[in-house]
Image (cartoon, helix red, strand yellow):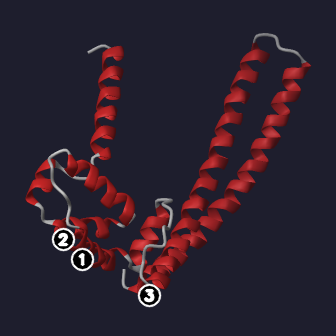
Amino acid sequence: MTTGTMKTAVLMLAALTALASCASISREDCMAGDWQAIGLRDGTAGVRPDIQFDRHQRQCAKVDVTPDRTEWQRGYDLGLQRFCTPLSGLEQGQRGRINHNLCPAGLAAGFDEGHALGLREHAQKKRVQNVLNEISSLQDQNRAALAGLAAGGDDGMRADLHNTRSDILHLRLELGLERAALRRLEREVAAFRARVGG
């Protein structure tokens, strides 16, 4: 298989996956009509109820089925009990997902605390990666400058090389600080897991 053919196959697979993800429910699920089980699955996944149920309605209309909102809501509320835990909030935050404030009053505080902590860890990991990316970019510039100097470059290239080396040193110091901050957050996450039973 040529590189072009492989790229085309990958793009087609990605498109098919995207199309599949747009369908909230299968035709078979519509026909079976176990709306409480479907609601349970949706609540456990922490999807937004109005948007998700609207998707179900549109999908099932294709096979002339009307979803049972009462049964679906009963299942959804049960599923939400599973979703709205401190550990689930933590995991959602670690993935950088938005808190849509779906949890009922009795469960919201624990979920929100976990989510906020996970989001802080997610953001700190991004900061570490951003510094690494900056260092990598400057190292590429250095290699290009060295190649230019080897080919008879001028004083401007030498100055650029000196500046990028200085920038890399500063970024390495910043990287150390960002990694230390990440380690502190990871210890905080571990303590949170231990406290809430994870």
Residue 134 in the figure: left or right of residue 58: right
Against 143, is 105 above or below?
Answer: below
Q: Nearer the viewer, residue 5 or 45?
A: 45
Circle 2 SS class: helix
Residue 36: mark: 2
Q: Which residue is mark 1?
A: 74
The image shows residue 137 at horizontal and vertical percentages of: 67, 35
- Residue type highlighted by circle 1: Arg
Against 166, is 51 above or below?
Answer: below
Q: Nearer the viewer, residue 105 or 110?
A: 105
- How many marks do you count on the picture? 3
Circle 1 SS class: helix
Q: Residue at x 36, y 80 (%)?
A: 198
Residue 6 in the figure: left or right of residue 66: right
The image shows residue 159 at horizontal and vertical percentages of: 88, 28
- Residue type highlighted by circle 2: Gln
Against 16, is 76 above or below?
Answer: below
The image shows residue 130 at horizontal and vertical percentages of: 64, 48
10 Å neighbourhood of mark 3: few (<14), some, or many (≥20)?
A: few
- Marks 3 and 2 sit apart, C-alpha to C-alpha, by 33 Å
Q: Which residue is mark 3?
A: 195
Q: Residue at x 20, y 61 (%)?
A: 67
